[in-house]
Image (spheres, grey):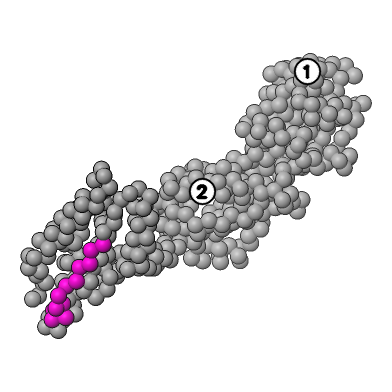
């Protein structure tokens, strides 16, 4: 076969025909054979083809040969079962890194890594040019030219024509995905989806999880209109709380790569600045060939549930009346302080504060006023101690103080620690000596 004999006029004519075909609408598969048959000869390629990405149930990424054109005398590869589906790994792992980042594969086969040489050389390829296809922001697959007789490097015509085809193909694939979603959700189901107390969505399988569809509940829950949400593909990661963002993005990557369900609780900021907790669950939806189409999910506002959980967790270690740590927390921290002191030659002191004759307050003024007095005592104990000291309520009219990390003098004498503890006790006496006034008494 003669070497490639492309020219500007033939290439431009092929590009015009290609654009016209895709402008007619319909599925990309209905046009791709004609487009390749027009573009391949014009560019002087020996073979032109389209591979679409497919993930198997284990998350392994495969390339699926969906269309091919071959010049006369060039062996066809489409009908060979071993080529219809081919895993990227291990032979073409490098292509994942290059193409997924928007790069191109442009090389004679002799210069490629050994694993790639063996596969492409087995098909008689001496030069290859591959350009990635992106649909709705997600890496969809790639289009490529092969040389089987001429190792002359590719020029600008080849790259330009292939990049244009990749752009048209990606746009058509994205439109087809949206159409398939619309067909999958008939009107009788759409009314249910758009009135349940949750957000339903369909996201592209990309890093930002850009939206292909979101239900109207997005405005009530997060303050953004459907139009605002759909217009900004980076809005979802932007509104996630900074402490939760790495975890959410990592879960999204895992979900997209493995095909396993997305299931996460995280915080986001609403449009008006409120912080809410969301439960987000999604599944990968595939077409009849097993190709991933989108991530379809449901988001629920679980802020009230989270507040309840936080309240229960707080009450497990705090006194409900005064907000001070309770006996359970005190005992745990006391054990830790004793262990730490033993390792660092320090000291720990425990002070018990018991209010004398407190029953008289409850009997004469009532329990409501008695509770007010206990709160005032708690405030004064906090003020009389260091920030590193722990003030706890033991129960009733008794309080506990944990004075940890008391330093001894250079010789290990306890005197310095005792002096420190006695000074705290004196401040407590002084703090409680002043009258305690409860409102209404």
Question: Does the segment drawn in magenta span residue 356?
Answer: yes
Q: Visible in this render: residue 395?
A: yes
Determine the image quadrant of residue 440: bottom left
Q: Which residue is mark 2?
A: 247
Residue farthest toward the bottom in the current orientation of the protein? 363
Identify which residue, 22 or 53, lies in the foreground: 53
Question: Does the segment drawn in magenta span residue 357?
Answer: yes
**Left or right: 32 in relation to 380:** right
**Left or right: 170 in relation to 41:** left
In x, y percent, where is residue 21?
Answer: 72, 36
Q: Which residue appears at 65% of the width and 33% of the height?
A: 97
In x, y percent, where is residue 199?
Answer: 51, 59
| Badge 1: residue crowd in 10 Å (few <14, some 14–19, many ≥20) | some
Disc nearer the start of the sequence (2/1): 1
Identify which residue, 168 or 62, lies in the foreground: 62
| Badge 2: residue crowd in 10 Å (few <14, some 14–19, many ≥20) | few
Determine the image quadrant of residue 2: top right
Q: Which residue appears at 71% of the width and 35% of the height?
A: 93
**Left or right: 364 in relation to 66:** left
Q: Which residues are magenta?
A: 350-361
**Left or right: 162 in relation to 341:** right
Q: Visible in this render: residue 41?
A: no
Q: Dot 1 lies on which element?
A: loop
Identify which residue, 237 or 27, lies in the foreground: 237
Of the 4 image quadrants, the one containing the C terminus is bottom left
Residue farthest toward the right in the current orientation of the protein? 73
The answer to whether residue 96 is above or below residue 402 is above
Q: Which residue appears at 14% of the width and 75% of the height?
A: 356
The answer to whether residue 324 is above or below residue 416 is below
Q: Which residue is mark 1?
A: 6
């Amino acid at each position: 076969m003669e070497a490639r004999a492309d020219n500007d006029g033939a290439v431009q004519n092929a590009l015009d025909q290609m654009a016209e075909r895709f402008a007619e609408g319909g599925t990309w598969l209905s046009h791709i054979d004609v487009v390749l048959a027009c573009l391949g000869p014009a560019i002087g390629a020996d073979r032109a083809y389209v591979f679409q990405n497919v993930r198997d149930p284990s998350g392994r990424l495969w390339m699926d040969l969906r269309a091919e054109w071959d010049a006369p005398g060039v062996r066809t590869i489409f009908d060979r079962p071993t080529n219809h589906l081919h895993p990227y790994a291990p032979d073409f792992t490098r292509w994942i890194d290059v193409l997924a980042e928007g790069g191109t594969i442009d090389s004679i086969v002799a210069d490629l890594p050994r694993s790639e040489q063996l596969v492409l050389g087995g098909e008689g390829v001496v030069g290859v040019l591959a350009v990635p296809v992106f649909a709705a922001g997600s890496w969809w697959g790639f289009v490529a030219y092969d040389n089987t007789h001429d190792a002359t490097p590719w020029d600008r015509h080849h790259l330009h024509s292939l990049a244009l085809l990749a752009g048209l193909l990606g746009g058509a694939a994205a439109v087809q995905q949206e159409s398939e979603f619309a067909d999958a959700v008939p009107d009788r189901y759409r009314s249910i989806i758009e009135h349940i107390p949750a957000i339903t969505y369909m996201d592209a399988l990309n890093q930002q999880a850009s939206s292909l569809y979101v239900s109207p509940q997005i405005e009530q829950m997060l303050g953004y209109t459907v139009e605002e949400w759909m217009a900004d593909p980076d809005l979802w990661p932007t509104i996630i709380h900074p402490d939760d963002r790495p975890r959410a993005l990592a879960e999204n990557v895992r979900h997209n790569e493995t095909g396993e369900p997305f299931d996460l609780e995280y915080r986001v900021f609403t449009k008006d600045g409120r912080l809410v907790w969301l439960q987000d669950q999604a599944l990968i939806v595939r077409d009849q060939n097993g190709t991933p189409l989108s991530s379809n999910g449901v988001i629920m506002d679980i802020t009230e549930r989270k507040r309840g959980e936080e309240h229960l967790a707080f009450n497990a270690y705090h006194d409900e009346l005064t907000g001070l740590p309770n006996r359970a927390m005190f005992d745990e921290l006391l054990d830790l302080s004793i262990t730490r002191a033993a390792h660092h030659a320090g000291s720990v002191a425990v002070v018990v504060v018991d209010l004398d004759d407190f029953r008289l307050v409850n009997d004469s003024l009532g329990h409501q006023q008695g509770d007010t007095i206990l709160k005032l005592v708690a405030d004064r104990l906090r003020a009389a101690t260091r920030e590193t000291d722990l003030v706890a309520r033991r129960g009733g009219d008794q309080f506990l103080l944990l004075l940890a990390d008391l330093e001894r003098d250079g010789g290990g004498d306890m005197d310095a620690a005792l002096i420190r503890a006695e000074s705290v006790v004196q401040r407590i006496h002084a703090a409680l000596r002043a009258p305690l006034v409860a409102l209404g008494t």
